[in-house]
Structure formats: C-alpha cells, structure tokens
C-alpha cells in the first residue's frame, strides 16, 4: 500500500513531543519530531524506530517454567497469563484482603488512570507510582503554601516569557531536561535577560549565567532563607501583599534573622557576596521568574520545606501572578475522573498513610518507598502480591533491600517492553504495546485535546496496557466497571464534560481546542487562595496540625558534613545523583545501540582537587562507597562539579546502581521522598 503519514506522540520521555509517523505496508519507516529544536537536540526521538523494532522486544506473555523465580520463562497465551494473574490476586484477596495486593506503575504515564481504576475496583487502596520520588513533592509544597489551584505553577516557568527580565534557574540543566526549551533560553539571554543559576554543577546554562551559585547539595532551603534575609533586610519586598495576602510573615522575619549571608555561606558553601548579588539582582530586575528542576530541591530529608522556602521568593518580591513572573495562567478542559479514588476512604490505610498522611491524602497515591519495610513487618496487614507495571527496582532507595523483600511475595506480575531487573522478579511477564501501537487520549494546557490512533498493529502479541487492565478486570469480577472492555466508550465517558467525543477527535486528527477561560492577572484578588486561611500560608496550618514545623524551617540532612562529622574520615564527599542525560530517560533505552554509544558507561563526576587526592584519572574504574555499601563506575574528572561533591548517574543496572547505597530510613517526614542528592560518600580507585 502507499505510504501513510499519521499523527503520533513520542513517549520516550514525558515531554510527549508531537510526531509525524510514516507507515508503509503496515510498518513504520520514518518518524519525524515536529518541533525542529527538539528534533535537532534530542537523540531519543531519532531512536524511536530502534525501540519499536528492537529484536529484544517482548512479544508474548511469559510464565516461570518451575515453582521458583530462578526457573526459566516459557511463552503462554494471554488467556492463560491473565487467568494465572487473576487466580493469584483473588487467592490473596480471599486469604488476606484486597489491600494485600500493591499496584505500582511507572512509565509511560498515559495509561495510569486505567491502572488506578483497576486498583480501587479490585478493592486495594495501594495505588502507587514513580511519583513517590518525583515531581509530587514540589506539587505538595506549593499546595501547602498557595493552595491546590497553584499545584502546577512551578512547571509554567519551563519556557521563556518575553516579558521576563531576570530568570533564576534552580538546579536544572534545561538542555538535558527540556531540549525543546533550550534555544529559547539562549536567545533570551542574548537579548538581555539576566540569568542566575543555582546548581552544584557548572552546566551549560550555568556557564552562561550572570551569577552562578554552586551550593552544597541539600542546602537549597538555607540558601532561600538567606536570600529572604537580604530581601527583608533591604526592604525589597511587597509590603502590601505580605500584609494582605499572607499568614506568618512576621514569624518568617524572625526565622530568617539567623540566615545572614555569612551564616548562609557557611552552610551552603556559596560565598556571602555571591548570595547578596543574586538576591539583589532577582529582586530589582523585574519582572523576574524562578524555574525549578523536577526533584533537585526535594530529594532530601527536608525536601518539602526546602521547596516551600524557595517558592516564597516570587510572592515576597512582587513577581507572583504578574506577566513575566511566576504565574499559573493555563487551564485544562474538563474531564471525568475514572480513578475511583473516592473509595479509598472506606478501605484499610494504604502504604505510607501512617507516616506521610499529608502526601497520601492530598496527592491521592500511596507512598511506595515504605513497601520493603511493610513487606518485612507485615503490619498493619501483610503485603502478599505486587502488580508492577514497568517495575523498576532501581527506583527505590536501598534498592537491594527492596529486591530481597519483593522476592518474599507470594506472586508478582510485571508488564514491560523488554526484560529488565523488574521482570527478573516476576512470576508472570506481560508484553505491552508501544505508543505507536495503542489508542491514546492526549490533553495539554489551554484546553487542547487530541486522539492518537494506533499507527501500526502491535508488535508480536503485545497488548496496549488499557486492554490488559480491562481484560484482567473481567477475571477479577469487576469487568462491569470497565465499559465492557471497550476503550472508545471509556474515552467518550472521560471526554463527556468537555462536550467532545472520540468521533469529533477522529474528524479532527490535529486536535481540538476547548474554550477555557484565561485566568486574569492577580486572580487571587477575586478568588483568594485555596488554603485553609484563604491566603498564602508562609506558616502552614496543615503542617502544624500534623506536628510539623509550620514555617519553612531548614534542617541539615541527617548524613552531611555538618550533621555527621564523625563519618567524614571514611565518607568525606557529598553524593548527588540523578542528573538527566539526553540519551536516556531514567533506566530506559540503554539497550538501544545508537543511544548507548553516546554514553556507554556510568560516569562519576569528580572535581580535580578530589581526584588528585585519590590518584584518580578520567576513565579509571572507581568504587563509590556510602555507609550502606558500594557501586562501581568510571571516573570523569571535571571542574564542572563543586569540590567536595560528586555527581553520580542513576538507574544503571547491576554493580553501578547508585540507589543501592542510598538511605531508605531517613525519608522526608512530609512526602516520604528519599535522600538521593545529599548523602555522604567516598570515591576510591577500584
């Protein structure tokens, strides 16, 4: 047949870039990223064909040939696979209760509502995602401070507003995180926008900055309080807004008195005069905007409070809800929620609700970082089975402990595209269809919605995830809640409040626009803030009610040069992990040769001063040690990393898995996040 060109989405990361998919005789021959900047910079888009037609794609369901998880996998039919899964889940439900089955999902994010619905239709409260360690902590900090309407406003600063005169980029490289926004920042800087970058690494964007603050990882909250000290001391704050629209400003003034530039410099390792210059530039070059990375400020013991301190800067300086500042102006089209999450209130408490009730209640997920602990303790009820959609054991702090405890479960089923460390823990493995092989409803800000049709038939006998969950629901006795297995009926139900239908979207393959009402400048003057007080809660009433500090108090990481000087003889360096790289999305795509060539080995960035002390040269095999163990990588000696700090990549399997040596005990007491970016370590020649 002649070549067809179809609309598509690249789901090799959460940017979900629009694509044009060329199909000839049922096979994809070419995929073009529509955005020319992303197409030029990001190698993942070019590697989509390598992924879709990779020879190692899982093409049929598998089960263990024997009774233990060391036996080989053998192929089976979908009927047999789903029957096995259903039988084991129903057995656990009968003997222990549905709550003893945990449902955990990672990438991609588009099928999550169907998985969420399956969890609660089955009767388990334990719906978990990778949000247990991702953006949700920033969302939570913002909701506690500004209210739920502003939960996502920190994401709005990823692009460039022509009105912005000064931009403060807090620990994100942009080029590796959001390549589609890279050129916009380059051009804005060239056109006169002032640039402040906070990052322990001298990234490409940091090398362009007017001021670069290289802070010790984990001290973001102290740096923000130090800046607030300067702004308040210099009377560079919006007095009217503070008096009329905030709760706790007087208490904040008392708190920041201790964070003089000199004291802040001692904590953060940033020179006092650099802190002063940055604070003054941000406060006087208006409108100014802050851009945050997804997790650098929150992958710490004090992460939520760190972020709360940072997000006060726009409100204090009059850079909140004004053009060119930090504002949330976008609305989405109305949709029906299919998650059934309202049923959780009648279920037993889910994972983490005892330790992190604010996060689990407001974010409407359970905190999976406690899963290993709960499997161990069996309290308040046993965990006996796990559905891991894209299960990644390397996601969890102290991940070796997680692996050993998952092995104790009665039954594990995993979905994925390839064999991974997650599938190695499974009794049954289910192959999933790629983003080019399934229906997808895609919504974006400002009311945009489109329906992506499958460009090709599924490779092998892989299934789209929605179909797996819908068909499993029938066997679990809840099939009547899944539209008779019809995805189109489901999507029409989701779309119902918008007035659109799937047929409408099919007639408009480029997408449709729902007429959302734009939010006016300073919308809070009419609507207030959706916090208990109706104001910006510098002093959070919700935190106070749960026994936490109401103010964004800084706490030193439990394992740092200041809190644990007794460890410095053995572990004198600060470990930060998880810096993004263009070829990979977390643990994904290292099996694609053209991407692997760009970064064939995990590299530890270490400053020349620290390397010379240890006789380490670039390319040397080194051991990274923490109080919990060690991993092996190659050294990259570079002055782009702050002396006393090493930057380590995340989610490399085997002996290079850095999360195996990350603490899983001292989690953020509000969000439950791990300390992936501020623990002590040492680096030695292997």
Image: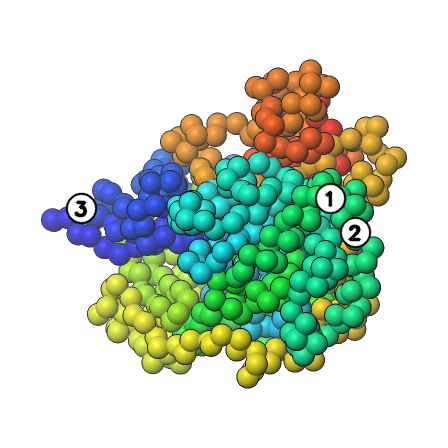
Q: CA distance from mark 1 to mark 3?
A: 62 Å
Relative to the observer, which residue lies in front, 148 or 87? Answer: 148
**Residue 260: mark in rendering:** 2
Residue drawn at (48%, 30%), measured in percent from left and top? Answer: 599
Residue drawn at (79%, 42%), measured in percent from left and top? Answer: 266
Q: Is residue 36 visible?
A: yes
Whether label 1 touches label 2, CB < 8 Å: yes
Q: Earlier in the sequence, mark 3 or mark 2?
A: 3
Characterize the local packing of mark 3: few (<14), some (14-19) or many (20 or more) Cα atoms within 10 angstroms. some
Q: Secondary structure at mark 1?
A: helix
Residue drawn at (82%, 64%), measured in percent from left and top? Answer: 254
Characterize the local packing of mark 2: few (<14), some (14-19) or many (20 or more) Cα atoms within 10 angstroms. many
Residue pushed farthest top? 615
Q: Give the residue number, with chain letter if any, for mark 1.
A: 272
Q: Is residue 581 above or below residue 8?
A: above
Q: Is residue 55 left or right of residue 603?
A: left
Q: Quadrant of residue 542?
A: bottom right
Whether label 3 touches label 2, CB < 8 Å: no
Relative to the observer, which residue lies in front, 12 or 127? Answer: 12
Place of residue 99 in the rendered image (x, y in percent of width and height, measured from the top left)? 65, 65
Q: Give the residue number, with chain letter if any, for mark 3.
A: 24
Q: Is residue 505 left or right of residue 611?
A: left
**Residue 99: mark in rendering:** none
Q: Earlier in the sequence, mark 1 or mark 2?
A: 2
Residue pushed farthest right? 566
Q: Earlier in the sequence, mark 1 or mark 3?
A: 3
Whether label 1 touches label 3, CB < 8 Å: no
Place of residue 332 in the rendered image (x, y in percent of width and height, measured from the top left)? 43, 71
Q: Is residue 458 above or below residue 686?
A: below
Residue pushed farthest left? 2
């Amino acid at each position: 047949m002649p070549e067809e060109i179809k609309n598509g989405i690249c789901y090799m990361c959460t940017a979900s870039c629009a694509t044009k998919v060329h199909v000839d005789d049922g096979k994809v021959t070419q995929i073009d990223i529509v955005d020319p900047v992303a197409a030029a910079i990001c190698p993942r888009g070019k590697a989509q064909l390598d992924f879709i037609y990779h020879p190692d794609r899982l093409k049929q369901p598998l089960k263990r040939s024997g009774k233990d998880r060391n036996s080989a996998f053998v192929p089976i039919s979908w009927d047999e696979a789903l029957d096995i899964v259903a039988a084991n889940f129903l057995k656990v439900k009968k003997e222990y209760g549905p709550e003893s089955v945990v449902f955990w999902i990672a990438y991609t994010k588009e099928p999550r509502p169907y998985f969420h619905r399956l969890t609660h239709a089955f009767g388990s409260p334990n719906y978990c995602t990778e949000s247990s360690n991702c953006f949700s902590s920033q969302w939570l900090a913002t909701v506690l401070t500004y209210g739920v309407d502003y939960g996502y406003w920190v994401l709005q600063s990823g692009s460039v507003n022509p009105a912005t005169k000064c931009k403060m980029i807090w620990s994100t490289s942009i080029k590796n995180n959001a390549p589609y926004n890279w050129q916009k920042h380059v051009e804005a800087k060239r056109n006169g926008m002032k640039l402040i970058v906070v990052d322990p690494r001298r990234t490409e964007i940091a090398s362009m900055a007017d001021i670069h603050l290289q802070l010790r990882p984990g001290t973001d909250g102290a740096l923000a309080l130090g800046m607030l000290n300067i702004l308040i001391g210099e009377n560079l704050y919006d007095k009217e807004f503070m008096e009329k629209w905030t709760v706790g400003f007087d208490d904040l003034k008392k708190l920041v008195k201790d964070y003089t530039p000199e004291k802040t410099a001692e904590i953060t390792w940033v020179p006092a005069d650099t802190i002063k210059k940055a604070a003054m530039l941000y406060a006087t070059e208006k409108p100014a905007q802050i851009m945050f990375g997804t997790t650098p400020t929150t992958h710490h013991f004090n992460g939520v409070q760190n972020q709360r301190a940072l997000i006060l800067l726009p409100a204090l300086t009059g850079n909140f809800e004004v053009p060119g500042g930090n504002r949330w102006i976008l609305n989405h089209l109305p949709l029906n929620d299919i998650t059934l999450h309202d049923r959780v209130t009648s279920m037993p408490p889910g994972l983490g609700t005892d330790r992190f009730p604010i996060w689990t209640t407001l974010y409407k997920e359970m905190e999976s970082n406690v899963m290993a602990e709960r499997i161990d303790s069996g309290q308040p009820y046993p965990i006996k089975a796990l559905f891991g959609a894209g299960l990644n054991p390397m996601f969890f702090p102290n991940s070796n402990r997680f692996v050993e405890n998952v092995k104790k479960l009665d039954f594990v089923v995993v979905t994925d595209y390839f064999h991974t460390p997650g599938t190695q823990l499974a009794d049954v493995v289910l192959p999933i269809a790629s983003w080019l092989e399934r229906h997808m409803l895609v919504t974006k800000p400002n009311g945009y919605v489109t329906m992506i049709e499958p460009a090709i038939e599924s490779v092998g006998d892989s299934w789209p995830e929605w179909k797996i969950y819908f068909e499993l629901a029938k066997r679990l006795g809840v099939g009547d809640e899944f539209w008779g297995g019809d995805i189109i009926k489901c999507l029409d139900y989701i779309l119902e409040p918008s007035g659109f239908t799937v047929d409408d979207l099919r007639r408009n393959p480029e997408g449709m626009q729902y007429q959302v009402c734009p939010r006016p400048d300073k919308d809070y003057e009419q609507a207030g803030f959706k916090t208990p007080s109706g104001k910006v809660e510098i002093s959070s009433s919700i935190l106070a009610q749960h026994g936490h500090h109401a103010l964004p108090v800084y706490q030193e990481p439990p394992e740092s040069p200041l809190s644990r000087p007794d460890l410095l003889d053995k572990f004198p360096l600060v470990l930060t992990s998880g810096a993004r790289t263009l070829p990979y999305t977390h643990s994904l795509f290292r099996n694609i040769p053209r991407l692997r060539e760009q970064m064939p080995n995990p590299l530890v960035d270490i400053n020349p001063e620290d390397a010379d002390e240890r006789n380490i040269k670039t390319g040397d095999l080194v051991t990274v040690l923490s109080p919990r163990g060690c991993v092996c990588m190659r050294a990259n000696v570079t002055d782009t990393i702050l002396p006393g700090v090493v930057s380590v990549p995340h989610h490399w399997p085997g002996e290079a898995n850095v999360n195996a040596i990350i603490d899983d005990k001292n989690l953020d007491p509000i969000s439950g996040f791990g300390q992936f970016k501020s623990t002590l370590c040492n680096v030695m020649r292997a």
